Image: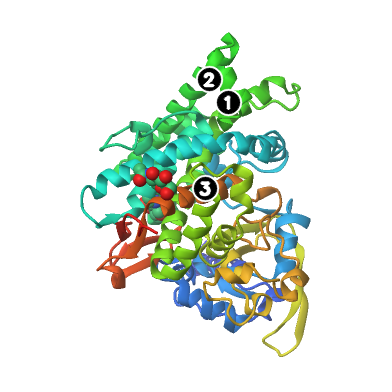
Amino acid sequence: MDLLTSLLLALVLLGALTWTIRRRLATPPSLRNLPGPKSPSWLKGNTQQLMGRHSNEWNKQTAETYGPLSRLTGPFARTWLNVYDPKALYSIAIKDQDIWLKNAAAANVRLLGPGLLTTQGAQHRKQRKMLTPVFSTAYLRGITSVFYDTTHKLRDGLIADIGATDSKEVDVLKWMGRAALELLGQGALGYSFDPLVGDTTNDFAEAVKSFFAALNALSVFRLVAMPFLLLGGKLPSRVHGMLIDAIPSRRVQRVKHIVRTMRQRSVEIVAEKRAALAKGDASTVRQVDEGKDIMSILLQANMAASEKEKLSDEELTAQISTFILAGMDTTSNATARLLHLLSLHPDIQKKLRDEILEAQAGEEVSYDRLNELPYLDSVCRETLRLYGPVRTLARRAMEDTVLPLHEPVRGTDGTWLTEVAVPKGTVAILNLWACNTNKAVWGEDAHEWRPERFLAPLPRSVEAARIPGVYANLMSFHGGSRSCIGFKYAQLELKVVLAVLLANFTFEPSARDKDVVWNNAGVAYPSVGRDSKKPELPLKVSPPPRA
Ligand SMILES: *[C@@H]1O[C@H](CO)[C@@H](O)[C@H](O)[C@H]1NC(C)=O
Ligand SMILES: *[C@@H]1O[C@H](CO)[C@@H](O)[C@H](O)[C@H]1NC(C)=O
C-alpha cells in the first residue's frame, strides 16, 4: 500500500468515526422539537447552571420559560430532559418505573453496598417489601419517645451553649447536624454517635459526616473515571479493591477510607444486634417489642421471613449507611431551614409556639397528637414544598419509551405536543422543586413561603394534576417504589425537634443574617456569604418570652 492509499484510508476511517460520534451525540429527532436553553459548554452542558451552588434563579427561569418538559444539555453535548410535568413524572416514577432507572447504579453499589438507595429491579422490590412495614406508623409511634429523649439532650446542649447570657449567636446548623445524626443513631440503629454534650469524636460519625464532601471533591475525577468505576462494578471485589488501592490520589484514598469505615462499623452493629437477639437478650427484645429502633425491627422481621424473602447479611449491612446518608444531611439542613424561616417570620413562630404549648400542657405531645396539630403540619409541609432539601433526581431510559403530558408543551416549530417519544439512553432530570412551585398548579404565589395555604382548601388544579409524590401532593420525597421510605420518620423528627425547641427558645436572625445564602448541592445548605462553602447558620437564640 502506498502512502497516498494509507492516507486516504485513514481519512475515511476518521470521517466515519466522527460521523458516528456526531450521530450519537446529535439530539434524537423526537426531542429536537422540544424547547430548551442554550448550552454554554460542550464539556459540561447546562449541568453547572442546573446544579451549581447558586442555581435557583436559573432553574426557576428555565422552568418558567421552557415549560414542564424541556430539553437540556448534559455533559459532552448529550441531550437531557428537564421534567416537572406531573403526568410525565407519574410515568417515570410509577407506571414505567422499570424503564426509568437510576444512573451509575453499579458504581454506587460499590460505594454503599446493595442497599435500598442503590439496588434496582427485583432486588430493590424485595428490600422495599421487607422495609416498608418497618417504617410504618405502628413502629414510629414507639420511636417517638426515643426522639424526645434525644431532642431533650439537644435542648440541654443548646441551653449550656447559650449559658447565662440572655441570648447568643449560635450555629444552629451545627446543632441540627449533631442532633440529626444522633436521632438516626438512636431511632434507626439503636446506637449512640454523640452524647450531645461538649465536643466528642467518633470515627463512624466522622466517616458518615464527611462522605458527601469527600465524594464531591472527586467530581472532576469522577467524570473521567466513571467508565472505569462502572466497569469496576463487574470485577470481583478483591480485584476492584486492589485497583482502588493502587490509585495514587489522596482524594480517592479518602473516599475509600470512609467507605471502609462505614462498612466495618455497620457489620459490627448488625453482628451485635443479631447476637443479642439470638441470646434473647432482654433489653434488645424489649426494644424490638416497643419498636425502639428500625434496625432491630428489621433484623427480627428478617429472621421471621421465608428464605425467598430474606435479605442477605450484605444487604442488611448496606441499609445502615443507606439510612444514615439518606437521613442525615437532609433532615439537619431541613430543620435548620425551618428555624431560619421562623426567625424571619416572628408572627408565624409565635403562632406555632402557642399551638405547641397549648398541646403540651406540661407533657410530651404524643405521636398522634403531634400529627394532629394543624399549624405545625402546615409549616412543615410548606417548608418541604418550597425548600425540600433534594431538588432534582436523575433517571435514564433503558428502552425507547413515551412521556405523556398533563399540559401540552409548545414545540419549537409552534405545534403543541401532548406526548414525546424518548429514545433509549436519554437522561431525564426530575425537577422535584419545579413541580412543587409550578404556578399553573399551586397558583401565582407558588414561590412564596406561606404555611396558611395548607389550612385552606388547595386550588383545584392541585388535585387535577395528580402529582405522583408520596406526600401531600409534593414531589419532595419523590413517588412510587423509589420514594423516600423514611418520609414519615423525617416528618416526625421535624415535628419533635420543633415542639421541643420552640417551647424552650426564641429564634431571631443574627447580625450576619443578610449574608446568609442557601446553596444547592446534593442537599441545599446555608452558608454565610455567597463565596463561602462552609455550611453554617448563625441565629440569635434566647429563652422564649415569658407569657
Ligand atoms: C447540610 O448539607 C451540606 C451539603 O450537602 C452538608 O455538607 C452538611 O453536612 C449538611 N448538614 C450539616 C449539619 O452541616
Ligand atoms: C422547656 O419548656 C417547657 C414548656 O414550656 C418547660 O416546662 C420546661 O421547663 C423547659 N425546660 C427548660 C430546661 O427550660
**Quick check: 505 above or below 80?**
above
Q: Which residue is mark 3?
A: 360
Q: Is residue 101 depicted above or below 108 in this figure?
A: below
Q: Position of residue 329 (x, y in %)?
A: 44, 49
Q: Residues within 10 Å of mark 1 (few under 14, many from 20)?
A: many
Q: Amino acid at mark 1?
A: Ser
Q: Residue at x 44, y 74 (%)?
A: 41
Residue linked to disc 2: 273
Question: In which quadrant of the rendered view does residue 282 lie?
Answer: top right
In this picture, is 121 found above or below 192?
below
Amino acid at dot 2: Lys
Give left or right: position of 127 versus 393. Answer: right
Which residue is under mark 1?
296
Q: Earlier in the sequence, mark 1 or mark 3?
A: 1
What is the secondary structure assignment of the residue under circle 3?
helix
Is there a contact, CB below 8 Å, between mark 1 and mark 2? Answer: yes
Closer to us: 122 or 445:
445
Q: Residue furthest bottom?
A: 414
Q: Secondary structure at mark 2?
A: helix
